[in-house]
Image (cartoon, rainbow, N blue to C red):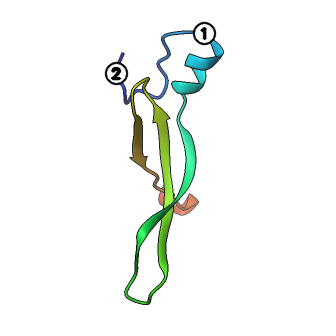
Amino acid sequence: MSRYNIFQSTSFSPERAWADTWHLWTVMFPRRSITGRLLWGKVWRRHDGRRWIYKKFVEYEPDDLG
């Protein structure tokens, strides 16, 4: 199973099914911008059984899709 394939699942147990699912998280970064504000953003997060995997979340405007 590829760890980056969103649609592939290996088990139907509730614990494993939850771990194989990507979740959208809002995260704060421990650094400040040049204006002094904390940096934050959204990422996809999933647990592979040993560690958390993060993927960049990209939002698209409806006009950009066509």
Residue 32 placement (x, y as % from top left): 41, 79
Q: Amino acid at mark 1?
A: Phe
Q: Please say whether residue 66 is visible from this viewpoint.
A: no
Q: Amino acid at mark 2?
A: Ser
Q: Nearer the viewer, residue 32 or 42?
A: 32
Q: Secondary structure at mark 2?
A: loop
51 sits to left or right of 17: left
How many marks do you count on the picture?
2
| Residue at x-position 50% and y-position 16% | 9
Q: Secondary structure at mark 1?
A: loop
- Among numbered discs 2 and 1, the one appearing first in the sequence: 2
| Residue at x-position 60% and y-position 25% | 18
Can you say whether 18 is above or below 1 in the image?
below
Residue 16 placement (x, y as % from top left): 55, 17
| Residue at x-position 49% and y-position 67% | 40
Can you say whether 32 is above or below 52 in the image?
below
- Tell me the number on the disc at residue 48: none
Q: Nearer the viewer, residue 4 or 13?
A: 13
Residue located beneath label 2 in the image: 2
Can you say whether 10 is above or below 4 in the image?
above
| Residue at x-position 45% and y-position 87% | 36
Quarter of the picture holding the N terminus: top left
Residue 52 placement (x, y as % from top left): 42, 37
Q: Please say whether residue 64 is visible from this viewpoint.
A: yes
Residue located beneath label 1 in the image: 12
